[in-house]
Amino acid sequence: MKPRLLVIEMHHLGDAVMALPFLRVASRVRECIVFCRPGVAEFLREAAPGCGIVGCGGWRDVFLRLPKLRACDTVVCVWPDTRAHLAMKWSGAGTRIGFRVVARNFYGAARPWRKRRLLAGGLATRVLSLAGPLLTHPLDRAAEGQTHSGNWSQIARCIGCTPDYSFPWLPVPDAPLEFRDFVKSSREAGMRVVAMHAGGRMPGKRWPMEHFQTLLGYWFPRRNVAVVIVKPPGGGSPHPLVPSQRVFESPYPVSLAALLAGVDGVLCNDSFASHLAAAVGVPVVTVFGSGDPEWFAPFGNEHLVAASDVCPFRPCVDRCAQPSYLCLENVSIRLVEEKLSAMLPDLLEKTK
Protein backbone atom coordinates (compact mmCIF):
# COMPACT_ATOMS: atom_id res chain seq x y z
CA MET A 1 0.00 0.00 0.00
CA LYS A 2 1.24 3.48 -0.84
CA PRO A 3 2.08 5.80 2.05
CA ARG A 4 -0.65 8.40 2.61
CA LEU A 5 0.00 12.11 2.02
CA LEU A 6 -2.31 14.94 3.11
CA VAL A 7 -1.95 18.34 1.41
CA ILE A 8 -3.61 21.39 3.00
CA GLU A 9 -4.23 24.13 0.39
CA MET A 10 -6.90 26.52 1.69
CA HIS A 11 -6.20 29.36 -0.74
CA HIS A 12 -7.51 30.29 -4.18
CA LEU A 13 -7.67 28.90 -7.73
CA GLY A 14 -4.42 30.46 -8.93
CA ASP A 15 -2.59 29.02 -5.92
CA ALA A 16 -4.08 25.60 -6.67
CA VAL A 17 -2.73 25.76 -10.23
CA MET A 18 0.78 26.35 -8.89
CA ALA A 19 0.45 23.22 -6.75
CA LEU A 20 -0.35 20.96 -9.73
CA PRO A 21 3.24 19.91 -10.65
CA PHE A 22 3.75 18.80 -7.03
CA LEU A 23 0.39 17.04 -6.80
CA ARG A 24 0.97 15.24 -10.10
CA VAL A 25 4.24 13.66 -9.04
CA ALA A 26 3.24 13.13 -5.39
CA SER A 27 0.13 11.19 -6.43
CA ARG A 28 2.31 8.74 -8.39
CA VAL A 29 4.22 7.61 -5.32
CA ARG A 30 1.70 8.25 -2.54
CA GLU A 31 -2.01 8.13 -1.87
CA CYS A 32 -2.61 11.87 -2.02
CA ILE A 33 -5.52 13.68 -0.30
CA VAL A 34 -6.03 17.44 -0.71
CA PHE A 35 -8.03 19.62 1.69
CA CYS A 36 -9.10 22.81 -0.12
CA ARG A 37 -11.91 25.34 -0.57
CA PRO A 38 -15.10 24.02 -2.25
CA GLY A 39 -14.56 26.10 -5.42
CA VAL A 40 -10.97 24.91 -5.67
CA ALA A 41 -12.14 21.34 -5.06
CA GLU A 42 -14.33 21.54 -8.16
CA PHE A 43 -11.27 22.53 -10.20
CA LEU A 44 -8.85 20.02 -8.68
CA ARG A 45 -11.16 17.05 -9.20
CA GLU A 46 -10.63 17.59 -12.92
CA ALA A 47 -7.11 19.04 -12.86
CA ALA A 48 -5.55 16.53 -10.43
CA PRO A 49 -7.36 13.25 -11.13
CA GLY A 50 -4.76 11.22 -9.24
CA CYS A 51 -5.66 12.87 -5.92
CA GLY A 52 -8.56 12.55 -3.53
CA ILE A 53 -10.10 16.01 -3.14
CA VAL A 54 -11.96 17.17 -0.03
CA GLY A 55 -13.73 20.54 -0.16
CA CYS A 56 -13.67 22.34 3.20
CA GLY A 57 -15.79 25.40 3.95
CA GLY A 58 -13.17 26.94 6.27
CA TRP A 59 -10.66 26.12 8.97
CA ARG A 60 -13.34 24.91 11.37
CA ASP A 61 -14.44 22.44 8.72
CA VAL A 62 -10.83 21.30 8.27
CA PHE A 63 -10.55 20.43 11.97
CA LEU A 64 -13.93 18.66 11.93
CA ARG A 65 -13.01 16.54 8.92
CA LEU A 66 -9.52 15.53 10.04
CA PRO A 67 -10.66 12.96 12.66
CA LYS A 68 -12.79 11.26 10.00
CA LEU A 69 -9.79 10.89 7.69
CA ARG A 70 -7.87 7.63 7.70
CA ALA A 71 -4.41 8.14 9.21
CA CYS A 72 -1.82 9.87 7.03
CA ASP A 73 1.92 9.27 7.18
CA THR A 74 2.85 12.77 5.98
CA VAL A 75 1.08 16.13 5.82
CA VAL A 76 2.36 19.21 4.00
CA CYS A 77 1.33 22.85 3.56
CA VAL A 78 3.13 25.53 1.57
CA TRP A 79 1.73 28.47 3.59
CA PRO A 80 3.27 29.80 6.84
CA ASP A 81 -0.04 29.71 8.68
CA THR A 82 -0.36 28.64 12.32
CA ARG A 83 -3.89 27.36 11.68
CA ALA A 84 -2.55 25.02 9.02
CA HIS A 85 0.33 23.91 11.22
CA LEU A 86 -2.03 23.14 14.10
CA ALA A 87 -4.26 21.17 11.72
CA MET A 88 -1.20 19.27 10.52
CA LYS A 89 -0.42 18.22 14.10
CA TRP A 90 -4.11 17.48 14.74
CA SER A 91 -3.99 15.04 11.80
CA GLY A 92 -1.65 12.78 13.77
CA ALA A 93 0.81 12.47 10.88
CA GLY A 94 4.32 11.60 11.99
CA THR A 95 5.91 13.79 9.31
CA ARG A 96 4.70 17.39 9.08
CA ILE A 97 6.41 19.59 6.48
CA GLY A 98 5.77 23.32 6.14
CA PHE A 99 7.19 26.84 6.21
CA ARG A 100 7.82 28.57 9.52
CA VAL A 101 5.78 31.61 10.54
CA VAL A 102 8.60 34.13 10.08
CA ALA A 103 8.96 37.27 7.96
CA ARG A 104 11.06 35.57 5.27
CA ASN A 105 8.22 33.17 4.50
CA PHE A 106 5.33 35.58 5.05
CA TYR A 107 3.85 37.34 2.02
CA GLY A 108 3.53 41.13 2.43
CA ALA A 109 5.16 41.00 5.87
CA ALA A 110 6.09 44.72 5.75
CA ARG A 111 2.47 45.88 5.65
CA PRO A 112 1.26 46.92 9.13
CA TRP A 113 -1.77 44.62 9.28
CA ARG A 114 0.25 41.72 7.88
CA LYS A 115 3.00 42.43 10.41
CA ARG A 116 0.42 42.20 13.19
CA ARG A 117 -0.84 38.90 11.80
CA LEU A 118 2.74 37.63 11.56
CA LEU A 119 3.44 38.56 15.20
CA ALA A 120 0.18 36.93 16.35
CA GLY A 121 0.94 33.81 14.34
CA GLY A 122 4.47 33.59 15.69
CA LEU A 123 3.24 33.97 19.28
CA ALA A 124 0.51 31.37 18.78
CA THR A 125 3.05 28.98 17.30
CA ARG A 126 5.36 29.33 20.30
CA VAL A 127 2.51 28.74 22.76
CA LEU A 128 1.10 25.76 20.88
CA SER A 129 4.59 24.27 20.48
CA LEU A 130 4.99 23.96 24.26
CA ALA A 131 3.26 20.58 23.91
CA GLY A 132 5.61 19.58 21.09
CA PRO A 133 6.56 21.06 17.70
CA LEU A 134 3.77 21.67 15.20
CA LEU A 135 6.14 20.93 12.32
CA THR A 136 8.65 18.09 12.23
CA HIS A 137 10.35 19.57 9.14
CA PRO A 138 10.22 23.40 9.35
CA LEU A 139 11.33 25.12 6.15
CA ASP A 140 12.44 28.61 5.10
CA ARG A 141 12.44 30.25 1.69
CA ALA A 142 15.86 30.96 0.27
CA ALA A 143 17.37 34.13 1.77
CA GLU A 144 17.39 35.84 -1.62
CA GLY A 145 13.75 34.86 -2.13
CA GLN A 146 12.01 32.30 -4.30
CA THR A 147 8.68 32.03 -6.05
CA HIS A 148 5.65 30.18 -4.74
CA SER A 149 6.41 27.41 -7.25
CA GLY A 150 9.89 27.21 -5.74
CA ASN A 151 8.32 26.69 -2.32
CA TRP A 152 6.47 23.65 -3.67
CA SER A 153 9.74 22.33 -5.10
CA GLN A 154 11.30 22.65 -1.65
CA ILE A 155 8.49 20.61 -0.09
CA ALA A 156 8.80 18.02 -2.87
CA ARG A 157 12.49 17.49 -2.06
CA CYS A 158 11.54 16.71 1.53
CA ILE A 159 9.43 13.76 0.40
CA GLY A 160 12.03 12.61 -2.12
CA CYS A 161 10.53 13.75 -5.42
CA THR A 162 10.73 16.54 -7.99
CA PRO A 163 7.63 18.37 -9.30
CA ASP A 164 6.66 17.44 -12.84
CA TYR A 165 6.64 20.72 -14.78
CA SER A 166 6.05 19.15 -18.20
CA PHE A 167 3.15 20.79 -20.07
CA PRO A 168 0.24 20.69 -19.74
CA TRP A 169 0.00 20.38 -15.97
CA LEU A 170 -3.60 19.23 -16.16
CA PRO A 171 -5.89 17.34 -18.56
CA VAL A 172 -7.16 19.84 -21.14
CA PRO A 173 -10.65 19.24 -22.56
CA ASP A 174 -11.61 19.90 -26.16
CA ALA A 175 -12.39 23.52 -26.96
CA PRO A 176 -15.81 24.43 -28.44
CA LEU A 177 -16.09 23.95 -32.19
CA GLU A 178 -16.83 27.64 -32.79
CA PHE A 179 -13.60 28.57 -31.01
CA ARG A 180 -11.54 26.04 -32.97
CA ASP A 181 -13.02 27.29 -36.24
CA PHE A 182 -12.16 30.89 -35.36
CA VAL A 183 -8.56 30.03 -34.49
CA LYS A 184 -8.17 27.87 -37.60
CA SER A 185 -9.53 30.51 -39.98
CA SER A 186 -7.37 33.19 -38.34
CA ARG A 187 -4.22 31.14 -38.77
CA GLU A 188 -5.13 30.28 -42.35
CA ALA A 189 -5.30 34.05 -42.93
CA GLY A 190 -1.73 34.37 -41.67
CA MET A 191 -2.62 35.70 -38.21
CA ARG A 192 -1.30 34.81 -34.80
CA VAL A 193 -3.99 34.41 -32.13
CA VAL A 194 -3.86 35.95 -28.64
CA ALA A 195 -6.38 35.45 -25.86
CA MET A 196 -7.34 38.49 -23.79
CA HIS A 197 -8.76 37.94 -20.30
CA ALA A 198 -9.54 41.18 -18.41
CA GLY A 199 -10.95 39.57 -15.24
CA GLY A 200 -9.51 39.22 -11.77
CA ARG A 201 -10.75 38.21 -8.35
CA MET A 202 -10.08 41.58 -6.66
CA PRO A 203 -10.26 45.20 -7.93
CA GLY A 204 -6.59 45.72 -7.05
CA LYS A 205 -5.69 43.08 -9.61
CA ARG A 206 -7.71 44.40 -12.55
CA TRP A 207 -6.01 46.73 -15.05
CA PRO A 208 -8.51 49.34 -16.31
CA MET A 209 -10.86 47.82 -18.87
CA GLU A 210 -10.39 50.83 -21.15
CA HIS A 211 -6.68 49.97 -21.50
CA PHE A 212 -7.56 46.53 -22.83
CA GLN A 213 -10.05 48.21 -25.14
CA THR A 214 -7.39 50.63 -26.40
CA LEU A 215 -5.09 47.75 -27.36
CA LEU A 216 -7.94 46.13 -29.28
CA GLY A 217 -8.35 49.37 -31.21
CA TYR A 218 -4.90 49.62 -32.70
CA TRP A 219 -2.10 47.36 -31.38
CA PHE A 220 -3.59 44.03 -32.43
CA PRO A 221 -5.12 45.11 -35.78
CA ARG A 222 -1.93 46.88 -36.88
CA ARG A 223 0.07 43.72 -36.28
CA ASN A 224 -2.45 41.38 -37.89
CA VAL A 225 -3.14 39.53 -34.64
CA ALA A 226 -6.51 37.92 -34.02
CA VAL A 227 -7.90 38.17 -30.49
CA VAL A 228 -10.00 35.73 -28.49
CA ILE A 229 -11.72 37.93 -25.90
CA VAL A 230 -12.55 35.70 -22.95
CA LYS A 231 -15.63 36.69 -20.98
CA PRO A 232 -15.45 35.22 -17.46
CA PRO A 233 -18.62 34.07 -15.70
CA GLY A 234 -20.40 36.99 -14.10
CA GLY A 235 -17.77 39.46 -15.30
CA GLY A 236 -17.38 41.98 -18.07
CA SER A 237 -15.02 42.01 -21.00
CA PRO A 238 -13.82 44.39 -23.71
CA HIS A 239 -15.84 44.36 -26.90
CA PRO A 240 -14.47 43.42 -30.33
CA LEU A 241 -13.75 46.20 -32.82
CA VAL A 242 -12.83 44.26 -35.98
CA PRO A 243 -13.84 40.86 -37.43
CA SER A 244 -10.58 39.27 -36.23
CA GLN A 245 -11.69 39.79 -32.62
CA ARG A 246 -14.39 37.65 -31.06
CA VAL A 247 -15.83 37.13 -27.58
CA PHE A 248 -16.02 33.62 -26.14
CA GLU A 249 -17.63 32.90 -22.79
CA SER A 250 -15.79 30.50 -20.52
CA PRO A 251 -17.34 29.11 -17.37
CA TYR A 252 -14.66 28.28 -14.84
CA PRO A 253 -12.65 26.41 -14.14
CA VAL A 254 -11.17 23.80 -16.52
CA SER A 255 -13.03 24.93 -19.65
CA LEU A 256 -10.85 28.04 -19.62
CA ALA A 257 -7.79 25.84 -20.08
CA ALA A 258 -9.21 24.64 -23.40
CA LEU A 259 -9.35 28.21 -24.73
CA LEU A 260 -5.92 29.24 -23.46
CA ALA A 261 -4.26 26.08 -24.76
CA GLY A 262 -5.52 26.81 -28.28
CA VAL A 263 -3.88 30.22 -28.78
CA ASP A 264 -0.36 31.55 -29.33
CA GLY A 265 -0.24 33.84 -26.31
CA VAL A 266 -2.31 35.37 -23.53
CA LEU A 267 -2.76 38.87 -22.08
CA CYS A 268 -4.41 39.00 -18.65
CA ASN A 269 -4.26 40.30 -15.11
CA ASP A 270 -2.56 38.67 -12.13
CA SER A 271 -5.23 36.02 -11.76
CA PHE A 272 -6.22 32.39 -12.12
CA ALA A 273 -6.07 32.89 -15.90
CA SER A 274 -2.39 33.86 -15.84
CA HIS A 275 -1.37 30.73 -13.93
CA LEU A 276 -3.63 28.52 -16.04
CA ALA A 277 -2.02 29.88 -19.23
CA ALA A 278 1.41 29.03 -17.84
CA ALA A 279 0.13 25.59 -16.85
CA VAL A 280 -0.82 24.73 -20.44
CA GLY A 281 2.53 25.99 -21.76
CA VAL A 282 1.33 29.17 -23.47
CA PRO A 283 3.33 32.42 -23.00
CA VAL A 284 1.43 35.00 -20.96
CA VAL A 285 1.81 38.74 -20.43
CA THR A 286 0.55 39.42 -16.90
CA VAL A 287 -0.40 42.85 -15.59
CA PHE A 288 0.38 43.02 -11.86
CA GLY A 289 -1.29 45.48 -9.52
CA SER A 290 -1.41 44.86 -5.77
CA GLY A 291 0.49 41.57 -6.03
CA ASP A 292 4.24 40.89 -6.06
CA PRO A 293 5.59 39.11 -9.17
CA GLU A 294 8.72 38.05 -7.30
CA TRP A 295 6.42 35.68 -5.40
CA PHE A 296 3.61 34.96 -7.84
CA ALA A 297 4.69 35.55 -11.45
CA PRO A 298 3.29 32.77 -13.69
CA PHE A 299 5.77 29.92 -13.99
CA GLY A 300 8.35 30.52 -16.72
CA ASN A 301 6.87 33.91 -17.65
CA GLU A 302 8.64 36.19 -15.18
CA HIS A 303 10.14 38.24 -18.04
CA LEU A 304 6.65 39.01 -19.40
CA VAL A 305 5.30 40.68 -16.25
CA ALA A 306 4.10 44.29 -16.57
CA ALA A 307 4.20 46.03 -13.19
CA SER A 308 4.89 49.39 -11.55
CA ASP A 309 6.69 50.02 -8.26
CA VAL A 310 5.31 53.53 -7.81
CA CYS A 311 3.15 52.57 -4.80
CA PRO A 312 5.23 52.23 -1.60
CA PHE A 313 2.58 49.96 -0.03
CA ARG A 314 2.83 47.23 -2.64
CA PRO A 315 2.16 44.36 -2.13
CA CYS A 316 -0.81 45.39 -0.02
CA VAL A 317 -2.49 41.96 -0.23
CA ASP A 318 -5.68 43.58 -1.51
CA ARG A 319 -5.99 46.21 1.23
CA CYS A 320 -5.30 49.39 -0.71
CA ALA A 321 -3.86 52.26 1.37
CA GLN A 322 -4.11 54.83 -1.44
CA PRO A 323 -7.08 56.91 -2.68
CA SER A 324 -6.95 54.89 -5.94
CA TYR A 325 -5.12 51.90 -7.37
CA LEU A 326 -1.80 53.58 -8.19
CA CYS A 327 -0.20 50.19 -8.76
CA LEU A 328 -2.50 49.58 -11.75
CA GLU A 329 -2.89 53.15 -12.98
CA ASN A 330 0.87 53.41 -13.43
CA VAL A 331 1.21 50.27 -15.55
CA SER A 332 1.30 52.05 -18.89
CA ILE A 333 -0.16 50.82 -22.14
CA ARG A 334 3.29 51.31 -23.64
CA LEU A 335 4.84 48.89 -21.12
CA VAL A 336 2.20 46.26 -21.90
CA GLU A 337 2.85 46.76 -25.62
CA GLU A 338 6.54 46.10 -25.01
CA LYS A 339 5.73 42.89 -23.18
CA LEU A 340 3.37 41.79 -25.95
CA SER A 341 6.11 42.42 -28.50
CA ALA A 342 8.51 40.34 -26.37
CA MET A 343 5.92 37.54 -26.21
CA LEU A 344 5.44 37.47 -29.98
CA PRO A 345 8.74 38.87 -31.30
CA ASP A 346 8.08 38.15 -34.97
CA LEU A 347 5.04 40.45 -35.05
CA LEU A 348 7.06 43.64 -35.31
CA GLU A 349 9.12 42.15 -38.11
CA LYS A 350 5.92 41.53 -40.10
CA THR A 351 4.93 45.17 -39.80
CA LYS A 352 8.22 46.69 -40.99
Image (spheres, rainbow, N blue to C red):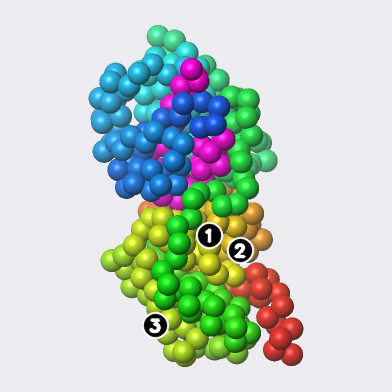
Frontmost residue, 203 versus 239: 239
Read off the residue under disc 3.
239
Image quadrant where residue 28 sits: top right
Q: Amino acid at mark 1?
A: Ala
Q: Position of residue 246 (x, y in %)?
A: 43, 81
Residue drawn at the location 34% of the way across and 62% of the way down = 251
Q: Nearer the viewer, residue 84 or 325?
A: 84
Label 2–label 1 contact, CB within 8 A: yes
The mark found on residue 283 in the picture is 2
Tell me whether the residue at label 3 lies in contact with that at label 1, contact meaning CB atoms closer than 8 angstroms: no
Residues tagged 2 and 3 counted as in contact (Cβ below 8 A): no
Other residues around mark 2 within 10 Å, as few (<14) / some (14–19) / many (≥20)? many
In magenta, the rendered stretch is: 1-26
Disc 3 from disc 1: Cα separation: 21 Å
How many numbered marks, from 0 up? 3
Q: Secondary structure at mark 3?
A: loop
Which amino acid does the dot numbered 3 rest on? His
Q: Residue 126: give x, y in percent of width and height.
A: 43, 18
